Amino acid sequence: MSTKSNKKPRFKYGSQASRDALSGYLYVAPFFILFLTFGIFPIFYNLYISLFSWKLFGAEPEFIGLQNYVWLLTDDPTFIKAVVNTFSIWIISTLPQLFIALVLAYVLNQGFVKMKDMFRMAIFMPFITSILAVTIIFNSLFSRDFGLINFILGTAGLDWKIDRFLSHIAIATMVNWRWVGYNTIIYMAGLQTIGKDLYEAATIDGANKIQQFFYITIPQLRPIILFTIIMSSIGGMSLFIEPLVFLDLRGGSHNQGLTMFLYLYETAFGTKYNVGYSAAISWVMFVIVVMFALLNWFITTKVIKD
Amino acid sequence: MKRFGLILMSLMLLFSFALAACATDEGGEGTTDEGNGTTTPEPDDEVIELTFQNIPNTGLDVLVEQYQSENPNIKINYQEAEFADHHNGLVTAMAAGSGIPDIAFVEIGFLETFKGQQNNFTNLYDLGAKDATGDYLDWKIKQAENADGSFLFGLPTDIGPMAMAYRTDIFEQAGLPTDPDEVSALITDWEKFVEVGKTVLEKTGKPMTDSGGTIYDTMVGQLTEVYFDENNELLLETNAGVKEAYDRATAMVEAGITAKVGQWSPEWNAGINDGGFATLMAPAWMMNYMKSSAPDGAGNWNIAQMPVASGNWGGSFLTIPAASEHPQAAYDFIEWLLSVDNQYEIFKATGNFPSTPGIYDKPEIQDWTDEYFQGAPVGQIYAEAAEKVVPVYFGPDHQTVNTAVKDAINNVENNDADPQAEWDAAIERVNRELR
């Protein structure tokens, strides 16, 4: 009884508290209404769709329970291939990308470099170019008979699109070219926060620049490195335009460059229009990305603690 | 009271958001109607407004203007989008059930997919198309019909009859005849095609054609039944014609008489330009493509009839989705738009090959020669090819199956895969993708 009497005045019409509460809710309402309509609802509707054999064209949707998931996980070599491709491209794009960015940031941060602003801008430029344009240019650079890459490497006739690993390298190169500048800028911002006294002390103790890089710069930058790894994981897991334009909707004739995202799209909007199966792919993809992010976080925090 | 006013204001803000959202949803249509309705009420009967979604370069847009000026009670809202965007937009609109035009351009490949959704279209036979179909090529009308021929999805625009373009310089070097009639007589079927291909490879070192996939598509296009029967049962494992085409295409690949270049790639364009391969299976519309992307090939190509029979690649239809509120007005418009006389006009303006055989003996077609092809009578060749096309039944899932089989050929061609293993893998993949 006492709780009731305590609560009653709070929600009495016209009271100060109820007005405050109401106006508060009204203020946040526009965001939440939009978020519910375009964020939450589609996510759960997607879950609902994934339980059906649902094609945009053809028979009426038919409820098949978890069958899509069973097919996807037990009887779909294409999906396995897409997962392996995604991780393969991620590894050969992220590792060199972050390392090069770190080295570039370190060099650009040195006192002897002149025209820093120009270099900074030049390095960041690729990031603001359209992915599509980048991919089309690289497409012709990697072309089999007339490509500049084959010309420079002296590997005429080498087809970068057909071999699975070569196509991954080509796609990773595009990703790297675009993202190295972005990461360099982030690292440069991080480098500004490291005190000069550390380097001065190291110099007095006789450490050279390379030793300073490995024993001062990298340890001090750990939180920033964690951030860039997480960002590039998100980007790498949702790789889409590069393989689409460089190869095709199926990631090439034997799915050599098919990524998870591309497979999801191809299933729903390629030739199959199978939205039920595509919805199931999106949920499995979600689980994979979450697990990957947790693993990432676990490993990196462990490294930082050590 | 100040607080109350605040709440009221925020409520109003919310409503105005909602209203704004609604208003943008309905788009310009609502506002223009309102404007017309209040200021200048139409004295005549109602003006029928038709939305027509098309792709660029069809030559139809000019005629739309003409129809509107001749029929003041029809207002055509003409919209254009690029090929892929247009079709994807149509797929999405039909799945969502809104934003569907009264008249939609549909290419043959997409029409097969749309046939699975008969209830999304108007049967043109119910609108009087029975009287018009006689003007068009039989096989073309058949492409637009459902399996039992009772439902017509669209009226034909242009067609893509096929012939074989060949390099006279390479043929000459290989000691083969270069005259179109002699070439047609020499290569009458695919066996001969392979034989000649081997001669060309031996004498000149040049491959006979661009890729195994192109030849496979061409051979399959000459069958009457491909992957599905008229009940949409999968025939992939039982149709001997398909397997034969597959075996023949992979055998050509293994004999080394294909150039291993995919269609539309830079290597392909270069091959057309400098003679990277000796023949190219070319539908009528390919001529423009060759001229614009391989200008140096001019004078080295000639055109003969294709082995076995003709074939068709591409071509389109105008359909009336079931969502249209004025199907009869829309039908009257497209029947006029695609009539024999107008196809003649379109052909003269754009070179799109007409689907109405009634005008094939017109001088513009009979005397049509092309310098790129050494002055070959291309009009006659394609008109003859057009009438030799055999109707093929494809079925709604044709693309899915065809992609799998052509990927298999591509793997044999570029990855030295084993043809039989790839065939088995393709069947497995098709069964998985169609479930």
Image (cartoon, coloured by chain):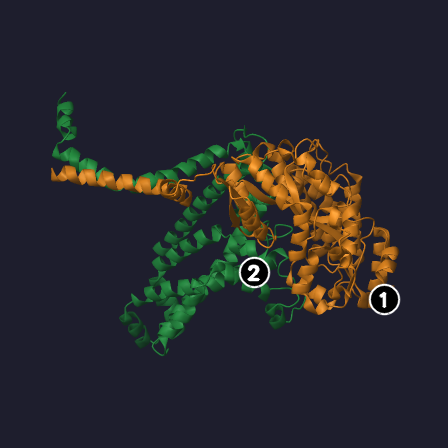
Tell me which chain appears orange.
B
Q: What label does residue A169 carry, if any?
A: 2
Instruction: Identify the amino acid type marked 1.
Output: Ala
- Measuring from the top left, give residue A236's x and y in whole percent: 48, 53
Which element is circle 2 on?
Answer: helix
Q: Residues within 10 Å of mark 1 (few under 14, many from 20)?
A: some
Is B152 in front, or is B18? B152
Q: Is residue B82 above or below residue B290?
A: above
- Measuring from the top left, give residue A123's x and y in whole percent: 42, 69
Q: What label does residue B408 carry, if any?
A: none
Task: Point out the frontmost of discs 1 and 2.
Answer: 1
Which quadrant does the N terminus of chain A fall into?
Answer: top left
Apparent side of residue A13 relative to residue A194 in the rendered image (left or right): left
- Measuring from the top left, give residue A46's x and y in whole percent: 46, 37
Is B405 in front, or is A110? B405
Q: Is residue B372 above or below residue B145?
A: below
The residue that mark 1 highlights is: B174
Is A101 in front, or is A196? A101
Tell me which chain appears green.
A
Residue B149 in sight in this render: yes
Residue A281 in sight in this render: no
Name the residue located 48 percent from the left edge and 50 percent from the top edge: A237
Which quadrant does the C terminus of chain A fall into?
Answer: bottom left
Separation of marks 1 and 2 at Cα, in angstroms: 41 Å
Is B140 in front, or is B178? B140
Which element is circle 1 on?
Answer: loop
Return the chain for callout 1. Answer: B
- Measuring from the top left, give residue B236's x and y in whole percent: 73, 38
Instruction: Identify the amino acid type marked 2.
Output: Ile
Apparent side of residue A27 relative to residue B435 in the rendered image (left or right): left
Q: Residues within 10 Å of mark 2 (few under 14, many from 20)?
A: some
